[in-house]
């Protein structure tokens, strides 16, 4: 695994990326930062194709991707969970078009067309978690521990970007989509889309993964260990310099100062990014199986998804 080439690190260029920016600006993080505005699902594809080495993204997306690989017999999966980036849950806002009066609440969405960035992305997975919470999932086949679920939606429309999702709910191509609350809020405020509800992840929301080529058992490539150390420093700086964080988020990213300050009240980054709590991943797998994203009884091994435990 020895190499001196800087890691290629995929990340979502939103407010959550602020500690990554601080790690580079103040602590010399030596990595090629590769933005993925379309989210975790796209990073999974990039990891498996060798375009990036590390990804910082949503827990449910990473776990769903590895679970699907295990179901298909691919025990490699292309990556492993190596760290925890955000401890707090994520608030997913449920959005529809500005002029869709027939959609009044989440209960109006059963049988509708869900817009997602990619199959397997957080926006896709959380649609099924929502359906599970609202008891829309109906078994269609199987007995015992192997049960298939009927889709609670008439269509799943893959739209890749947040901009395309917003356009689709206004054109009628999709009826609704789910995206992080504060990223969506600007477009509620300007009247482009309308908020009809929300749902929180029942798990800590962001994890760090590394390509399997950078993992040997519990041992990580030294560059990954250094990355995690630098992220720890970036998080410490973030926690101690909230005004600098607000300025960066409100001038360099797509958020108002007011929204940046409100978001700061909701987010909790860990002091140490190293390692992943196995129980968090077990709970995530159980929820995704209940929601029909993963199949019960198909050999999904949650602990095997983790390279380094806390």
Image (cartoon, rainbow, N blue to C red):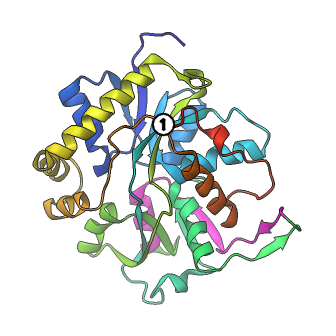
State whether residue 14 appears in this view. Answer: no
In this rendering, the answer to whether 262 lies above or below 222 is below
**Which residue does the numbered mark 1 point to in the structure image?**
275
* x, y percent for residue 242: 15, 49
Horizontal side of residue 199 vs 136, given as left or right = left
Where on the picture, by quarter, is residue 255?
bottom left
Q: Residue at x 51, y 28 (%)?
A: 51
Res. 152 in view: yes
Instruction: Name the secondary structure under disc 1.
Output: loop
Where 195 sits versus 119, above or below? below
Above or below, 29 relative to 141: above
| Quadrant location of the N terminus in the rendered image | top right
Please state the horizontal and vertical placement of residue 71, each as a whole percent of the image.
77, 47
Place residue 218 in its image quadrant: top right
Q: Is residue 163 magenta?
A: yes
211 to the left or right of 198: right
Point 12% across, 45% down: residue: 244
Considering every residue shown, the one lying at the far front of the view is 310
Left or right, 281 with respect to 189, comes to: right
Residue 235: percent from left, percent from top: 27, 40
Left or right? Give the position of 115 relative to 98.
right
Residue 220 included in the magenta stretch of the image? no
Magenta span of residues: 145-169
The residue at the point 86 percent across, 69 percent down is: 141
Q: Count of labels shown?
A: 1
Q: Position of residue 111 (x, y in %)?
A: 64, 80
**147 and 284: which is toward the camera:** 284
């Amino acid at each position: 695994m020895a190499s001196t080439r800087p890691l290629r690190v995929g990340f979502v260029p939103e407010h959550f990326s602020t500690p990554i920016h601080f790690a580079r600006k103040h602590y010399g993080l030596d990595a090629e930062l590769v933005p993925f505005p379309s989210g975790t699902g796209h990073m999974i594809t990039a990891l498996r194709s060798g375009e990036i080495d590390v990804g910082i993204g949503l827990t449910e997306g990473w776990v769903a991707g590895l679970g699907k690989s295990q179901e298909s017999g691919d025990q490699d999966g292309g990556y492993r969970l190596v760290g925890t980036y955000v401890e707090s849950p994520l608030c997913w806002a449920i959005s529809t078009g500005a002029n869709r009066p027939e959609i009044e609440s989440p209960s109006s969405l059963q049988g509708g067309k869900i817009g997602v960035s990619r199959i397997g992305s957080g926006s896709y997975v959380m649609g099924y978690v929502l359906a599970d919470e609202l008891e829309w999932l109906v078994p269609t086949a199987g007995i015992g521990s192997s049960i298939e679920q009927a889709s609670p939606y008439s269509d799943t429309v893959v739209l890749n970007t947040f901009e395309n999702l917003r356009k689709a709910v206004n054109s009628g191509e999709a009826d609704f989509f789910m995206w992080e609350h504060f990223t969506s809020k600007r477009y509620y405020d300007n009247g482009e889309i309308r908020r009809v509800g929300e749902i929180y992840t029942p798990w800590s929301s962001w994890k760090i993964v590394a390509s399997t080529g950078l993992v040997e058992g519990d041992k990580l490539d030294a560059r990954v260990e250094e990355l995690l150390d630098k992220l720890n420093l970036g998080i410490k700086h973030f926690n101690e310099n909230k005004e600098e964080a607000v300025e960066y988020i409100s001038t360099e990213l797509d958020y108002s100062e007011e929204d940046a300050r409100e978001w700061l009240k909701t987010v909790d980054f860990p002091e140490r990014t190293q390692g992943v709590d196995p129980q968090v991943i077990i709970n995530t797998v159980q929820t995704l199986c209940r929601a029909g994203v993963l199949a019960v009884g198909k050999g999904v091994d949650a602990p095997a998804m983790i390279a380094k435990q806390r």
